[in-house]
Amino acid sequence: SAVISQKPSRDICQRGTSLTIQCQVDSQVTMMFWYRQQPGQSLTLIATANQGSEATYESGFVIDKFPISRPNLTFSTLTVSNMSPEDSSIYLCSVMTDYYGYTFGSGTRLTVV
Amino acid sequence: QQQVKQSPQSLIVQKGGISIINCAYENTAFDYFPWYQQFPGKGPALLIAIRPDVSEKKEGRFTISFNKSAKQFSLHIMDSQPGDSATYFCAAQETSGSRLTFGEGTQLTVNP
């Protein structure tokens, strides 16, 4: 299965600033996914990022708040913009590795103060 | 709208005991049901999965039981060990490449 490197692993940010999270995969993948996991909660899909096309956002998530880049088949970034304490969460990158399987990165633990 | 409901929210089991986590779904288009295991500070990792054409799948100490008519499936962990202490998520997927729908998660603690 694919190996995902996600950076940074954690960060503490001031409200009103932005943070860009990087996701690097060791193999080429068509579909990459970004999830949010709030403390003690389940995973919520933010958006799906396909190379060469605009990301598709889930209900409740907008491009202005969570812009995504997908410049090639092994890399993607998620930016959390104009952060507030409510954005404090774990952000996870995921890729589809076979017919049904998904692999997740270790996540970025974001705290907004 | 939560399409996959998971219970219990937390579970404490003694070493050597059986851990049972249950999930129920509503969408009959789901045709793949994975379980993920997540340790603190890590992303979820696929543990075991089942398709609806079988009623049970076993891999080592982990077994999925699937009841298509009741739209329920469960994870059984036999001979539970302290190293099994983690959060477990059931999930469901409609077709290859489609999104995963996760349950709420179960925090399992196995006491030594």
Image (spheres, coloured by chain):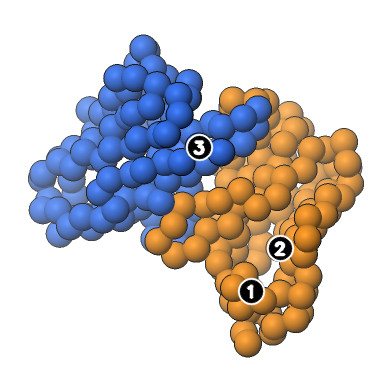
Chain colours: A blue, B orange
Kindly indicate whether the residue at mark 1 contacts the one at mark 2 (C-beta within 8 angstroms).
Answer: yes
Q: Residue at x 66, y 62 (%)?
A: B7
Mark 2: amino acid: Ile
In the image: residue A38, left or right of residue A11: right
Crowding at dot 3, Cα within 10 Å, few <14 / some 14-19 / many 20+, comes out as: some
Q: Where residue A28 sits in the image (x, y, percent)?
A: 45, 24
Q: Residue at x 10, y 45 (%)?
A: A16
Q: Secondary structure at mark 1?
A: strand
Which chain does tag 1 point to?
A: B
Disc number lying in front (3 or 2): 3
Q: Is residue A36 visible?
A: no
Q: Which residue is mark 2?
A: B21
Q: Where residue A31 sits in the image (x, y, percent)?
A: 47, 24
Mark number, residue B11: 1
Q: Secondary structure at mark 2?
A: strand
Q: Earlier in the sequence, mark 2 or mark 1?
A: 1
Q: Where residue B92 sits in the image (x, y, percent)?
A: 66, 40
Above or below, B21 against B2 in this view is below
Q: Secondary structure at mark 3?
A: loop
Quarter of the image where the N terminus of chain A is located: top right
The residue most toward the front is A26
Mark number, residue A98: none
User: How far apart in space, not on screen, are marks 3 and 2 (Cα)?
Assistant: 28 Å
Q: Is residue A47 visible?
A: yes
Quarter of the image where the C terminus of chain A is located: bottom left
In the image: residue A103, left or right of residue B68: left
Q: Quadrant of residue A20?
A: top left
Above or below, A25 against B46 in this view is above
Q: Which residue is mark 3?
A: A2
Q: Are marks 3 and 2 on the same chain?
A: no
